[in-house]
Image: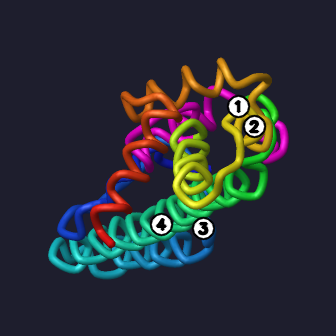
Amino acid sequence: HVTSDSAVPLPQDFLHIPVTGTLPAPERLIILMKQLQDSEKRYKDAVLNRYLCSSILGELSAQCRHLFCKNRHQKEQLYHDILDYISWHIQENLRIGEIAEHFGYNEKYLTTLFKQYAGISLKQQILQSKTDVAKSFLSETTQPISQIAYSLGFSDAHNFSNAFRKQTELSPSEYRAGYTMHSIFQK
């Protein structure tokens, strides 16, 4: 199959021709090649032959572009599916290996793909998502920090506090106190 791992769109003003691959409609190329062969035998017209060669290259490029766009769309969909999975399983101790297994991909491939789209690692995204939910709990509830930690899949409040501090540079208690003071001054 003709694929590209790049998330960058192909420029429209170039012909993109792969070194190897499988095309979705090779019969279209065969017809164009037969026309070129027939033209060479019958007319021996260099201008017509160059035109037919250009048509062949254009068709080849168009089929490759279609495959690339389809592949890119599938990767983008996978990225969004991973984000959804994290949201739905935020209360669990999420591991990258489990996410990769769930989607049927190699762990390294999944982390590389995710970083291409998000600009951050999958592990960082999991921690960021958990931190965002924790911020809501800390600012909108009076739940104990240990209870928030367990509800987000952390084994204990200490691990939760360390992860939260890495993301926000504040402990959960400091964040809650700062939010409470901010709320008082806003009223």
Q: Which residue is mark 3?
A: 26
Q: Residue at x 78, y 33 (%)?
A: 93
Q: Given this view, does label 3 or label 4 mark the residue nearer the observer? A: 4
Q: Earlier in the sequence, mark 4 or mark 2?
A: 4
Q: Is residue 42 left or right of residue 22?
A: left
In primary-sequence order, the first of circles 4 and 1 is 4
- Which is nearer the N-term, disc 1 or disc 3? 3
Find the distance from the CA under tag 2 to the CA under tag 1.
6 Å
Q: Measure the alpha-carbon separation of dots 4 and 2.
A: 23 Å
| Label 4 element class | helix
The disc, 3 or 4, on the residue closer to the chain's N-terminal end is: 3
| Location of mark 1 (residue) | 96
Q: Which residue is mark 4?
A: 69
Q: Residues within 10 Å of mark 1 (few under 14, many from 20)?
A: some
Q: Circles 2 and 1: CB distance less than 8 Å?
A: yes
Question: Nearer the N terminus, badge 2 or badge 3?
Answer: 3
- Image height of 9 relative to 44, above or below: above
Q: Secondary structure at mark 2?
A: helix
- The 10 Å Cα crowd at callout 3, few under 14, some 14 to 19, many 20 or more, is few
Q: Residue at x 44, y 40 (%)?
A: 175
Residue 100: which disc?
A: 2
Distance in Å between CA atoms under marks 3 and 4: 18 Å
- Numbered badge on residue 64: none
- State which mark lies toward you, 4 or 2: 2
Depth order, front residue of 110/64: 110
Find residue 168 and report its horizontal and vertical position in percent: 40, 35
Task: Check disc 2 and give the amino acid type.
Answer: Ala
Q: Position of residue 130 (x, y in %)?
A: 61, 43
Residue closest to the eye, 58 or 2: 2
